[in-house]
Amino acid sequence: MIAPILLIFFVAAIISFGVTPLAIKAAPKIGAVDVPKDDRRMHNKTMPRFGGIAIYLGSMLSMAFLLPEATDDRFIGIAIGATLILIMGIVDDIRGLSAKFKLAGQILSACILFGFSVRISFITNPFGGAYIEFPWIVSLLVTVIWIVGITNTINLIDGLDGLAAGVSFIATVSIAYIAYIHGRYEISMAFMALAGSCLGFLPWNFHPAKIFMGDGGALYLGFMIASISVMSPMKSATVIATILPIFVLALPILDTALAILRRIKNKRPIMEADKGHLHHRVMNVGMGQRRTVLILYCISGVMGVASVLISRDLFIDALILIVIATTLIYVFMKDQGFGKPFKD
Protein backbone atom coordinates (compact mmCIF):
# COMPACT_ATOMS: atom_id res chain seq x y z
CA MET A 1 0.00 0.00 0.00
CA ILE A 2 2.99 2.33 0.12
CA ALA A 3 2.89 3.10 -3.63
CA PRO A 4 -0.77 4.28 -3.72
CA ILE A 5 -0.21 6.38 -0.61
CA LEU A 6 2.84 8.08 -2.09
CA LEU A 7 1.08 8.49 -5.45
CA ILE A 8 -1.90 10.36 -3.97
CA PHE A 9 0.52 12.54 -1.99
CA PHE A 10 2.56 13.61 -5.01
CA VAL A 11 -0.48 14.08 -7.28
CA ALA A 12 -2.08 16.36 -4.67
CA ALA A 13 1.19 18.31 -4.29
CA ILE A 14 1.56 18.78 -8.06
CA ILE A 15 -2.03 19.95 -8.49
CA SER A 16 -1.80 22.37 -5.58
CA PHE A 17 1.56 23.73 -6.74
CA GLY A 18 0.27 24.22 -10.29
CA VAL A 19 -3.05 25.83 -9.36
CA THR A 20 -1.59 28.34 -6.89
CA PRO A 21 -0.12 30.72 -9.55
CA LEU A 22 -3.55 30.78 -11.19
CA ALA A 23 -5.09 31.64 -7.84
CA ILE A 24 -2.58 34.49 -7.41
CA LYS A 25 -3.73 35.99 -10.72
CA ALA A 26 -7.43 35.42 -10.05
CA ALA A 27 -7.51 36.81 -6.50
CA PRO A 28 -7.44 40.56 -7.39
CA LYS A 29 -10.09 40.05 -10.06
CA ILE A 30 -12.60 38.61 -7.59
CA GLY A 31 -11.58 40.85 -4.69
CA ALA A 32 -9.98 38.12 -2.57
CA VAL A 33 -7.15 40.29 -1.26
CA ASP A 34 -5.85 41.18 2.19
CA VAL A 35 -5.21 44.89 2.65
CA PRO A 36 -3.01 45.73 5.68
CA LYS A 37 -5.28 48.01 7.71
CA ASP A 38 -3.76 47.67 11.19
CA ASP A 39 -0.51 46.81 12.97
CA ARG A 40 -1.72 43.29 13.76
CA ARG A 41 -0.94 42.18 10.21
CA MET A 42 2.60 41.06 9.43
CA HIS A 43 2.59 42.22 5.80
CA ASN A 44 2.76 45.77 4.50
CA LYS A 45 1.30 45.34 1.03
CA THR A 46 -1.91 44.04 -0.47
CA MET A 47 -1.79 40.24 -0.71
CA PRO A 48 -3.98 37.75 -2.59
CA ARG A 49 -5.78 35.36 -0.24
CA PHE A 50 -7.25 32.80 -2.57
CA GLY A 51 -4.82 29.94 -1.89
CA GLY A 52 -7.52 27.80 -0.34
CA ILE A 53 -8.81 26.88 -3.79
CA ALA A 54 -5.44 25.31 -4.67
CA ILE A 55 -5.38 23.29 -1.43
CA TYR A 56 -8.97 22.21 -2.04
CA LEU A 57 -8.43 21.13 -5.65
CA GLY A 58 -5.17 19.36 -4.85
CA SER A 59 -6.69 17.24 -2.11
CA MET A 60 -10.18 16.73 -3.52
CA LEU A 61 -9.14 15.83 -7.08
CA SER A 62 -6.44 13.44 -5.92
CA MET A 63 -8.89 11.70 -3.59
CA ALA A 64 -11.63 11.61 -6.22
CA PHE A 65 -9.41 9.81 -8.75
CA LEU A 66 -7.02 7.81 -6.56
CA LEU A 67 -8.87 6.96 -3.35
CA PRO A 68 -10.82 3.70 -3.86
CA GLU A 69 -13.25 4.63 -1.06
CA ALA A 70 -14.02 8.07 -2.55
CA THR A 71 -17.55 6.93 -3.44
CA ASP A 72 -18.24 5.77 0.12
CA ASP A 73 -21.12 7.69 1.69
CA ARG A 74 -18.95 9.02 4.50
CA PHE A 75 -16.35 10.46 2.13
CA ILE A 76 -19.14 11.99 0.04
CA GLY A 77 -20.52 13.63 3.18
CA ILE A 78 -17.06 14.99 4.01
CA ALA A 79 -16.70 16.37 0.47
CA ILE A 80 -20.08 18.12 0.67
CA GLY A 81 -19.36 19.64 4.08
CA ALA A 82 -15.83 20.65 3.09
CA THR A 83 -17.05 22.33 -0.11
CA LEU A 84 -19.58 24.33 1.88
CA ILE A 85 -16.86 25.37 4.33
CA LEU A 86 -14.55 26.42 1.48
CA ILE A 87 -17.23 28.49 -0.25
CA MET A 88 -18.15 30.20 3.00
CA GLY A 89 -14.49 30.96 3.70
CA ILE A 90 -13.92 32.41 0.23
CA VAL A 91 -16.99 34.63 0.55
CA ASP A 92 -15.63 35.78 3.90
CA ASP A 93 -12.28 36.58 2.26
CA ILE A 94 -14.01 38.64 -0.43
CA ARG A 95 -16.87 40.38 1.34
CA GLY A 96 -16.55 39.55 5.03
CA LEU A 97 -19.06 37.55 7.04
CA SER A 98 -20.20 37.93 10.62
CA ALA A 99 -18.86 35.53 13.24
CA LYS A 100 -22.39 34.25 13.90
CA PHE A 101 -22.95 33.45 10.24
CA LYS A 102 -19.64 31.58 9.98
CA LEU A 103 -20.41 29.62 13.14
CA ALA A 104 -23.83 28.69 11.74
CA GLY A 105 -22.20 27.51 8.51
CA GLN A 106 -19.71 25.38 10.43
CA ILE A 107 -22.49 23.83 12.52
CA LEU A 108 -24.46 23.07 9.35
CA SER A 109 -21.42 21.39 7.78
CA ALA A 110 -20.89 19.33 10.94
CA CYS A 111 -24.57 18.28 10.85
CA ILE A 112 -24.11 17.20 7.23
CA LEU A 113 -21.28 14.93 8.37
CA PHE A 114 -23.49 13.51 11.09
CA GLY A 115 -26.17 12.79 8.51
CA PHE A 116 -23.62 10.83 6.47
CA SER A 117 -22.60 8.78 9.55
CA VAL A 118 -19.35 10.63 10.17
CA ARG A 119 -19.83 10.96 13.90
CA ILE A 120 -18.41 10.31 17.36
CA SER A 121 -20.87 7.71 18.64
CA PHE A 122 -19.03 5.91 21.45
CA ILE A 123 -16.02 5.97 23.76
CA THR A 124 -13.99 3.32 25.50
CA ASN A 125 -15.26 2.32 28.93
CA PRO A 126 -12.42 3.40 31.27
CA PHE A 127 -13.40 0.63 33.70
CA GLY A 128 -13.21 -2.10 31.09
CA GLY A 129 -15.89 -4.01 29.28
CA ALA A 130 -17.91 -2.86 26.30
CA TYR A 131 -17.84 0.58 24.73
CA ILE A 132 -20.06 3.34 26.09
CA GLU A 133 -22.55 4.17 23.34
CA PHE A 134 -23.83 7.74 23.04
CA PRO A 135 -27.52 8.52 22.50
CA TRP A 136 -27.91 10.13 19.09
CA ILE A 137 -28.43 13.62 20.52
CA VAL A 138 -25.25 13.35 22.60
CA SER A 139 -23.40 11.97 19.59
CA LEU A 140 -24.60 14.92 17.50
CA LEU A 141 -23.55 17.44 20.14
CA VAL A 142 -20.09 15.91 20.65
CA THR A 143 -19.52 15.62 16.90
CA VAL A 144 -20.51 19.24 16.23
CA ILE A 145 -18.33 20.57 19.06
CA TRP A 146 -15.34 18.54 17.83
CA ILE A 147 -15.74 19.52 14.17
CA VAL A 148 -16.33 23.23 14.86
CA GLY A 149 -13.52 23.39 17.42
CA ILE A 150 -10.83 21.82 15.26
CA THR A 151 -12.04 23.68 12.15
CA ASN A 152 -11.22 26.99 13.82
CA THR A 153 -7.84 26.02 15.30
CA ILE A 154 -6.05 26.15 11.94
CA ASN A 155 -7.69 29.47 11.10
CA LEU A 156 -6.54 31.08 14.34
CA ILE A 157 -2.86 30.19 13.85
CA ASP A 158 -2.84 31.45 10.26
CA GLY A 159 -0.97 34.61 11.21
CA LEU A 160 2.50 34.18 9.70
CA ASP A 161 3.69 33.19 6.24
CA GLY A 162 3.65 29.41 5.91
CA LEU A 163 2.63 28.70 9.51
CA ALA A 164 -0.84 27.19 8.99
CA ALA A 165 0.18 25.25 5.87
CA GLY A 166 3.29 23.84 7.53
CA VAL A 167 1.60 22.88 10.80
CA SER A 168 -1.23 21.26 8.81
CA PHE A 169 1.33 19.33 6.75
CA ILE A 170 3.04 18.01 9.89
CA ALA A 171 -0.30 17.11 11.49
CA THR A 172 -1.67 15.30 8.45
CA VAL A 173 1.53 13.33 7.83
CA SER A 174 1.58 12.28 11.50
CA ILE A 175 -2.02 11.04 11.48
CA ALA A 176 -1.49 9.39 8.08
CA TYR A 177 1.42 7.41 9.51
CA ILE A 178 -0.64 6.39 12.55
CA ALA A 179 -3.42 5.23 10.24
CA TYR A 180 -0.92 3.32 8.08
CA ILE A 181 0.71 1.38 10.92
CA HIS A 182 -2.73 0.40 12.20
CA GLY A 183 -3.95 -0.82 8.83
CA ARG A 184 -6.38 2.00 8.00
CA TYR A 185 -4.98 2.60 4.52
CA GLU A 186 -7.94 4.60 3.20
CA ILE A 187 -7.59 7.08 6.09
CA SER A 188 -3.84 7.26 5.50
CA MET A 189 -4.38 8.04 1.80
CA ALA A 190 -6.93 10.75 2.59
CA PHE A 191 -4.57 12.46 5.03
CA MET A 192 -1.65 12.16 2.61
CA ALA A 193 -3.78 13.90 -0.02
CA LEU A 194 -4.21 16.77 2.43
CA ALA A 195 -0.51 16.72 3.25
CA GLY A 196 0.42 16.85 -0.42
CA SER A 197 -1.87 19.81 -1.09
CA CYS A 198 -0.29 21.68 1.84
CA LEU A 199 3.23 20.91 0.63
CA GLY A 200 2.42 22.02 -2.92
CA PHE A 201 1.04 25.31 -1.63
CA LEU A 202 3.85 25.97 0.85
CA PRO A 203 6.54 27.20 -1.63
CA TRP A 204 4.18 30.04 -2.59
CA ASN A 205 3.15 30.75 0.99
CA PHE A 206 6.46 30.56 2.90
CA HIS A 207 8.06 33.89 3.83
CA PRO A 208 8.07 36.12 1.87
CA ALA A 209 4.63 34.86 0.84
CA LYS A 210 3.19 35.47 -2.60
CA ILE A 211 -0.29 34.39 -1.52
CA PHE A 212 -2.28 33.58 1.62
CA MET A 213 -4.59 30.59 1.98
CA GLY A 214 -7.27 32.86 3.45
CA ASP A 215 -10.15 31.79 5.64
CA GLY A 216 -11.28 29.49 2.84
CA GLY A 217 -8.10 27.43 3.00
CA ALA A 218 -7.63 27.52 6.77
CA LEU A 219 -11.22 26.55 7.58
CA TYR A 220 -11.13 23.85 4.90
CA LEU A 221 -7.96 22.28 6.33
CA GLY A 222 -9.28 22.35 9.88
CA PHE A 223 -12.59 20.84 8.78
CA MET A 224 -10.93 18.06 6.80
CA ILE A 225 -8.53 17.14 9.60
CA ALA A 226 -11.40 17.03 12.10
CA SER A 227 -13.81 15.08 9.89
CA ILE A 228 -11.41 12.45 8.53
CA SER A 229 -9.99 11.80 12.01
CA VAL A 230 -13.52 11.01 13.23
CA MET A 231 -13.53 8.09 10.78
CA SER A 232 -10.93 6.59 13.17
CA PRO A 233 -7.30 6.11 12.16
CA MET A 234 -7.17 3.11 14.49
CA LYS A 235 -9.26 0.01 15.03
CA SER A 236 -9.93 0.98 18.64
CA ALA A 237 -12.61 3.23 20.08
CA THR A 238 -13.51 6.60 18.65
CA VAL A 239 -11.97 8.31 21.68
CA ILE A 240 -8.56 7.34 20.28
CA ALA A 241 -9.48 8.92 16.96
CA THR A 242 -10.02 12.21 18.73
CA ILE A 243 -7.32 12.09 21.41
CA LEU A 244 -4.46 11.53 18.96
CA PRO A 245 -5.35 14.48 16.69
CA ILE A 246 -5.47 16.61 19.84
CA PHE A 247 -1.81 15.75 20.49
CA VAL A 248 -0.88 16.28 16.84
CA LEU A 249 -2.67 19.64 16.82
CA ALA A 250 -1.54 20.56 20.33
CA LEU A 251 0.06 23.81 19.17
CA PRO A 252 -2.97 25.36 17.41
CA ILE A 253 -5.37 23.94 20.01
CA LEU A 254 -3.34 25.48 22.86
CA ASP A 255 -3.08 28.77 20.99
CA THR A 256 -6.85 28.78 20.42
CA ALA A 257 -7.61 28.01 24.08
CA LEU A 258 -5.28 30.76 25.29
CA ALA A 259 -6.81 33.22 22.81
CA ILE A 260 -10.32 32.48 24.11
CA LEU A 261 -9.25 32.84 27.75
CA ARG A 262 -7.32 36.03 26.96
CA ARG A 263 -10.29 37.66 25.25
CA ILE A 264 -12.70 36.62 28.00
CA LYS A 265 -10.33 38.06 30.61
CA ASN A 266 -10.03 41.32 28.66
CA LYS A 267 -13.81 41.35 28.04
CA ARG A 268 -13.31 41.31 24.30
CA PRO A 269 -15.28 39.35 21.69
CA ILE A 270 -13.95 35.79 21.37
CA MET A 271 -13.65 36.06 17.59
CA GLU A 272 -11.80 39.41 17.72
CA ALA A 273 -8.26 39.26 16.35
CA ASP A 274 -5.29 40.36 18.44
CA LYS A 275 -1.51 40.10 18.68
CA GLY A 276 -1.35 37.77 21.66
CA HIS A 277 -0.99 34.51 19.76
CA LEU A 278 1.97 32.22 20.37
CA HIS A 279 3.59 33.12 17.05
CA HIS A 280 3.45 36.81 18.02
CA ARG A 281 5.08 35.98 21.37
CA VAL A 282 7.90 34.07 19.67
CA MET A 283 8.54 37.05 17.41
CA ASN A 284 8.56 39.33 20.45
CA VAL A 285 11.70 37.61 21.78
CA GLY A 286 13.54 38.77 18.67
CA MET A 287 12.75 36.16 16.04
CA GLY A 288 11.84 37.05 12.48
CA GLN A 289 9.02 35.39 10.59
CA ARG A 290 11.07 32.54 9.13
CA ARG A 291 12.74 31.62 12.41
CA THR A 292 9.45 31.85 14.28
CA VAL A 293 7.69 29.59 11.80
CA LEU A 294 10.54 27.07 11.80
CA ILE A 295 10.53 26.95 15.62
CA LEU A 296 6.80 26.28 15.64
CA TYR A 297 7.27 23.61 12.96
CA CYS A 298 9.72 21.88 15.29
CA ILE A 299 7.31 21.99 18.23
CA SER A 300 4.53 20.61 16.03
CA GLY A 301 6.86 17.89 14.78
CA VAL A 302 7.77 16.87 18.33
CA MET A 303 4.07 16.58 19.21
CA GLY A 304 3.45 14.65 16.00
CA VAL A 305 6.09 12.08 16.94
CA ALA A 306 4.62 11.93 20.46
CA SER A 307 1.21 11.07 19.02
CA VAL A 308 2.74 8.24 16.99
CA LEU A 309 4.40 6.87 20.14
CA ILE A 310 1.11 7.08 22.04
CA SER A 311 -0.64 5.13 19.29
CA ARG A 312 1.93 2.37 19.83
CA ASP A 313 1.52 2.44 23.63
CA LEU A 314 4.97 3.95 24.17
CA PHE A 315 3.70 6.36 26.78
CA ILE A 316 6.97 7.07 28.62
CA ASP A 317 8.75 7.97 25.38
CA ALA A 318 5.84 10.19 24.36
CA LEU A 319 5.80 11.90 27.75
CA ILE A 320 9.45 12.92 27.37
CA LEU A 321 8.71 14.58 24.03
CA ILE A 322 5.60 16.29 25.40
CA VAL A 323 7.64 17.71 28.29
CA ILE A 324 10.22 19.05 25.81
CA ALA A 325 7.55 20.71 23.66
CA THR A 326 5.78 22.11 26.71
CA THR A 327 9.04 23.56 28.03
CA LEU A 328 9.70 25.34 24.74
CA ILE A 329 6.19 26.80 24.71
CA TYR A 330 6.59 27.93 28.34
CA VAL A 331 9.86 29.70 27.53
CA PHE A 332 8.33 31.66 24.69
CA MET A 333 5.19 32.48 26.66
CA LYS A 334 7.24 33.88 29.56
CA ASP A 335 10.28 35.45 27.88
CA GLN A 336 8.85 38.64 26.43
CA GLY A 337 11.98 40.70 26.03
CA PHE A 338 11.78 43.03 23.05
CA GLY A 339 15.18 42.61 21.50
CA LYS A 340 16.05 43.74 18.02
CA PRO A 341 14.38 41.26 15.65
CA PHE A 342 16.51 39.08 13.42
CA LYS A 343 16.21 39.79 9.73
CA ASP A 344 14.88 36.94 7.62
Image (cartoon, helix red, strand yellow):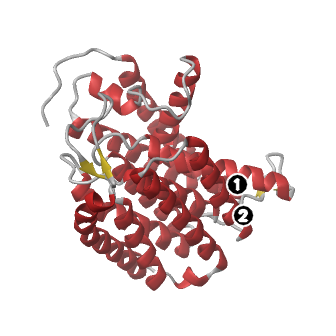
Give the label on residue 230, or none.
none
Q: CA distance from mark 1 to mark 2?
A: 7 Å
Where in the figure is residue 322, as x and y percent of width and height?
Answer: 48, 37
Asked if marks 1 and 2 touch (Cβ < 8 Å), the reply is: yes
Q: Residues within 10 Å of mark 1 (few under 14, many from 20)?
A: many
Kind of residue sitting beneath label 1: Thr
Q: Is residue 339 left or right of residue 135?
A: left
**Earlier residue among tags 1 and 2:** 2
**In terms of image quadrants, where is residue 27?**
bottom left
Query: Which residue is more in the foreground, 40 or 163?
Result: 40
Q: Residue furthest top?
A: 337
Image position of 101 with respect to 115: above or below: above
Instruction: Name the residue beneath numbered marker 2.
Output: 114
Where in the figure is residue 259, as x and y percent of width and height?
Answer: 50, 29
Q: Is residue 171 left or right of residue 79?
A: left
Q: Residue at x 45, y 31 (%)?
A: 326
Query: Which residue is more in the foreground, 146 or 232?
Result: 146
Q: Residue at x 53, y 35 (%)?
A: 271
User: In this view of the protein, can residue 284 be seen by the observer?
Assistant: yes
Where in the figure is residue 222, as x and y percent of width and height?
Answer: 50, 54
Query: Which residue is more in the foreground, 95 or 128?
Result: 95
Instruction: Name the residue beneath numbered marker 1.
Output: 143
Q: Is residue 34 left or right of residue 287?
A: right
Image position of 127 with respect to 192: above or below: above
Kind of residue sitting beneath label 2: Phe
Q: Residue at x 38, y 27 (%)?
A: 275
User: In this view of the protein, can residue 175 be seen by the observer?
Assistant: no
Badge 1 element: helix
Query: Which residue is more in the foreground, 321 or 146?
Result: 146
Q: Residues within 10 Å of mark 2 (few under 14, many from 20)?
A: many
